[in-house]
Amino acid sequence: MKRENLNVGWKFRLEGDAGSAIMSHMQTVTLPHTWNDKDGTSANYKRGVGVYTRTLTVYKCIGAAYYLEFGAAFSVAEVYVNKALAGRHEGGFSLFRVDVTKFLKSGENELEVRVDSRDREGIYPHKADFTFFGGLYRDVYLITSSETRFDLDYFGSDGVKITPVLKKNGEAEVDVTAYITNPRSDLKVDIDITFLGEVVAHASVPSESAHTVFRLEEPHLWQGKKSPLMYEARLCITDGIRKWDERRVKFGIRRAAADADGFILNGERLPLRGVALHQDSGGVGWAVDAARRKTDMQLIKELGANTLRLAHYQHGREIYDFADEEGLCVWTEIPFITGYDGGEENAALQLKELIVQNYHHPCVVCWGVGNEVSMEDGDPLPLIKKLNALAHKEDPSRFTVQACFCAEDPGSELSKATDAASFNLYFGWYTGKTEDTAVWLDEFRERFPKRAMGLSEYGCEGITGRHALFPRRGDYSLEYQAEYHEKTAEIIAARPWLWATHVWNMFDFASAARDEGGVKGMNNKGLVSYDRKVKKDPFYLYKAYWSGEPFVHIAGGERQLRAGAKGDCCVIKVYSNLPEVTLFAGKEKIESKKGRYVFAFEVPLKRAFKVTAVAGGCRAEVKVYRVKAKKDKGEEDLKYAKYPAPRADFPFKTSLGTLCPSRKGKFWCKKCCKKRKNS
């Protein structure tokens, strides 16, 4: 099989309703591409039909098959070859292929791909808290293969299914099935299982029934970050002389589960602690090239997380490969989001594509079938049950999960419809106090002692460059964001029975409908800025909790203001994963402190001075400036008063009752609840 990259040489124009022109002229573009790279943070970003055209020169061979492979296109794609419709795909996040063999001619061919990003009935997602970037935003390839080949027509798979099963006696069975298009009695499929380049098992089976089971007595396990070891299956269709087609598929042997006491990997407890991830990046939207994606991966690696929640859709194959190699446990899901409004066939299609295309990745430990599906009107329970059954049918080896809306009763049938559940909780941001998260979790634990429970989302906004001398909920300051995560990290650390927790979000991301904190079209809950240039303080907090790389960081930015009169003291916070930190003000040693993760020092205020933190061989420096204190501590933050809190305090209905801030974290009885939409 030959793969030719077709990213270069496309012409592009954008149409609106009934073919009306939004863009008056054709542009020359290179894939990945989105037409929303500039307006993706605008409430009126363009939703339309993007038309991509290019010529393709092919010299056809007798008996060869030709496919166009698209990494993704949002959200409905129609593929035309020489003006004939060759294929159509519905769903904006999965890989799909179109067999163009009978449409191509030898010589020059005209390709046209029409990508419709408008809301379409029956196709998910319909509404969500993120921008829908239209375009061919992943790579496109021309595949040339022989008449007899590994199947390329089954939901974007590679025509091979490998199922490793770890037995109780420590042995492993590796079931290998190859699906062959146009098999022949004179052809065999040679199968080698290799580890670190050495063949550990071999079989040769007929191409007409290409199936075998290998038994490995002492298998090397994929152990997460501790030891992410993988095998490789090498398959070849051959007549003994000629190679008709080949595949190389990496896989890992491991067993994963979640129960009331947490996550289990290969029989060992492993609390999963990490981040959720959207795929867009500043300036390019979803059209992220390899260099930018590599930067994202390096930042995740630096953070030290051991899990990723890939929200809220199937991501590109490179992120799954990265997680395999680094040992990160992945929750991956389909875009069944916010509420049910039909589209059962499409939701099932996207789930099947997600499972088939990512089946071999050992990093994937569970399949997500929905996110906050009870937020809007409609009954999502029947569809959640169907998707749960489909996931188990397609892959009995992994458990299912959903992210529940905070107001969903954990005793409801909906919240119990998957094997495990996690909740999106935002106490301390949208309502109440950060400490209320502990109240909610402990009440859940008391009420449902036998159920697996996790935190699928938690976080608060911190706008880059926004600082507050006296941080408070709703000021969008980096200081409040840091305080929020300091408290939440402590709450999580005290509850190892949480099977997985995912910070919302690793990076700031575009959300066109938002207008918060004076910043339009953005969700600023990320640990890193949208352009990846600023690592916010909570990034270093979690790095202290999760990473083994020694470091020290002074919270608050490179230039800091502190309020008070000369001689007063201010608090300097330091994050480090080292056991002792020493702080200096100028050349004066202030104090050495032993502790874990967060170190707070009182430092006498001067007009301007340099602060240095030293831990082991690591050091960090910042400049601190004294400003005059006001009688009313709120006056220094007066410029933030025009930005209201993300939600006003109100009796807030949660799954365990209604929380009222005036009652200091206590829950009201449900008789007092009043339903509030979009809360």
Image (spheres, grey):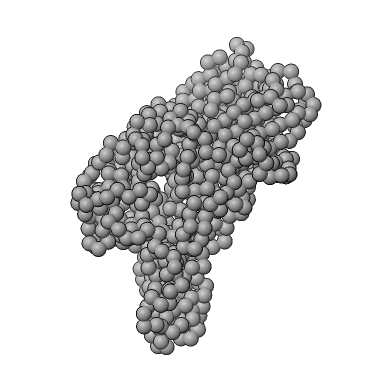
Quadrant in the rendering for residue 236 = top right
**Foreground residue, 250 or 93?**
93
Looking at the rendered structure, the number of numbered marks drawn on it comes to 0
Q: Position of residue 193 (x, y in %)?
A: 53, 30
Residue 15 in view: yes
Q: Is residue 10 above or below residue 247?
A: below
Q: Is residue 238 above or below residue 462?
A: above
Quadrant in the rendering for residue 197 = top right
Residue 507 in view: no
Please report the residue visible at 25 percent of the width from the left and 53 percent of the height from the top: 658
Q: Position of residue 564 (x, y in %)?
A: 40, 83
- Residue at the extreme top of the image, as rendered: 185
Q: Going by the image, does 348 lie left or right of 406?
A: right
Q: Going by the image, does 546 lie left or right of 234?
A: left
Please report the residue visible at 28 percent of the width from the left and 36 percent of the height from the top: 413
- Residue at the extreme bottom of the image, as rendered: 566
Please report the residue visible at 60 percent of the width from the left and 15 percent of the height from the top: 183
Q: Is residue 661 above or below residue 344?
A: below
Q: Is residue 57 above or below residue 496?
A: above
Q: Position of residue 667 (x, y in %)?
A: 22, 55
- Residue at the extreme right of the image, as rendered: 107
Q: Position of residue 462 (x, y in %)?
A: 46, 62
Please report the residue visible at 66 percent of the width from the left and 19 percent of the height from the top: 147
**Foreground residue, 26 or 580?**
26
Query: Where does the N terminus fall, quadrant-wise?
Result: top right
